[in-house]
Amino acid sequence: MPSPTPVQDRFPIMARAIPEAAPARGFWVVAAAFALLMAFGTLPTPLWPLFAERDDFGSTVVTIAFATMVAGAAVGFLLFGHLSDRLGRKRVAIPALLTSVVASLTLVLWTSIAGLLVGRVLTGLAVGLMASTATVYLSDLYYLAHPDRPGSSTPGLVAAAANLGGLALGPLAAGVLAQWAPYPLITPFVSFGATALVLAALVLCSPETISRTASAVTPARFALQPGGGRRFAAAAGTGFFSFAVMGFFSSLGAVVVRDVLHISSPLVAGLAPFTVFAASAAAQIALRHLTPVRMLVIGVVLFPTGLALTATALYHPALWLYLTAAAIAGAGAGLLFKASVGQAAAAARPASRAGVLALFFVVAYLGMGLPSIAFSVVAQHLGLNPSMICFAIGLSVGALAAVTISARLSARTSG
């Protein structure tokens, strides 16, 4: 991600007052908190069959329950995602963590479909508060700790890895706990809630990077660089389609494992979404030195390949093929996401980065929810396998169109 105006240049007095080690520690604390909240978003993935059995609902309700998290995230992004530009990063990050604690308690104590939906809305709200805030907070802390490294890709890489790595951690951790720990619908949420409390305390002790003087001037929620509108729109479109494949594996991945592969293990149910998000993070780390355009090109090749293999795995059920498809699709989606979030940030005016990224994440999370709902509805009429073919074609064509526009705009800018 391109570097913003360095924090020490914007607030030199604050930069001199903070010990050099403090922002360095805070950087990793915020990264851990970001990863934890993203993990909380996908935590129920391998548990959906258990929830469905407890509350007696089918795959459509599973998709709706997942979509309520997306709705909560959209509200968080739209209403509160920009606030850290004005109020300060910690004043948004800490409430996000505390909201996730309330969500955990709701999911544990309110054992019904209504409680599940309310808990997921609160989860989404916490994610919406954290995602754009943490992304810019990491950038602020890094440049405050390392003023001699302008233009470093490290904060963008860590933010993307925390985002997707956290999404990968959620289903894996829940699968392990549900497989071997007692009370599979209680232990995962209590564990994550307790961890969120610890991280909230650590974030409280981290340095703030928005001064009160700066926060007294209200920045525009959404302000782009001159000519940045089309660039942002193309980036948001790419984010939409990249998150759509992640939403499919997060909401329906466990259902496919149970109904198509006929495997009831919660651990195995968590492997497909874990594989998608882990491959996304791994691809970003392995190819971190590539330009955004090259990431887009490689991503738009891997993306439809993985979707085609996913459709094949439904016609020829095999766990190895399904996981291979998830890995390839996830790697492609991860590269598309990494390039698109960087382009969205580059299109923003420095004082509105959190607000611009908040809107970007709204579009991306709509991609995580809406296509999966449409898939579930269509599958009831056409069947799972034909619907997967339509799903793969639609997402591939959409991603190709968005990437083509992004690549052309990037070429014009560099030219």
Image (cartoon, rainbow, N blue to C red):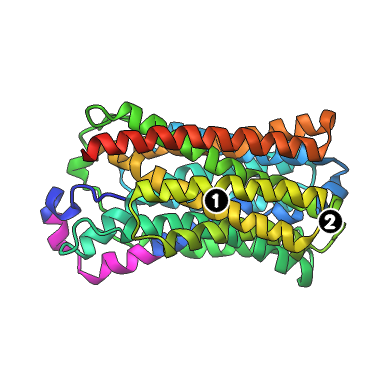
* Residue 351: % across, % down: 24, 38
In terms of secondary structure, where does tag 1 sit? Answer: helix
- The image position of residue 326, as x and y in percent, is 65, 55
Note whether 128 is above or below 260 in the view shown.
Answer: above
Tell me the distance, in whole angstroms, between the alpha carbons under discs 2 and 1. Answer: 24 Å
Q: Which residue is drawn at 11% across and 55% down?
A: 13
Q: Pick whichever, 251 or 102, lies toward us.
A: 251
The type of residue carrying mark 1 is Leu
| In this rendering, position of residue 226 left or right of residue 235 | left
Q: Main secondary structure of the magenta part?
A: helix
* Nearer to us in this view, 324 or 233: 324
Q: In this view, does 96 lie to the left or right of 385?
A: left
Residue closer to the observer: 182 or 257? 257
- Which quarter of the picture shows residue 390? top right
Q: Measuring from the top left, give residue 20's x and y in whole percent.
A: 20, 69
All told, the count of numbered labels is 2
Disc 2 vs disc 1: which is toward the camera? Answer: 1
Classed neighbour count for the residue bearing mark 2: other residues with Cα under 10 Å, few (<14), some (14–19), many (≥20): some
Look at mark 2 in the image and give the residue it sits on. Answer: 261
Provide residue 70's location: percent of width, then percent of height: 59, 38
At a point 27% along the width and 61% down the height, the residue shown is 142
Amino acid on which the number 2 mark rests in the picture: Leu
Tell me if residue 352 can be seen: no
Locate the C terminus by quadrant. top left
Pointer 1: what residue? 302
**Sooner in the amino-acid sequence: mark 2 or mark 1:** 2
For the point 50% across and 45% down, the residue is: 300
Q: Does the magenta stretch include residue 24?
A: yes
x 63%, y 44%: residue? 247
Q: Give the range drawn in magenta.
A: 13-28
**193 lies above or below 396:** below
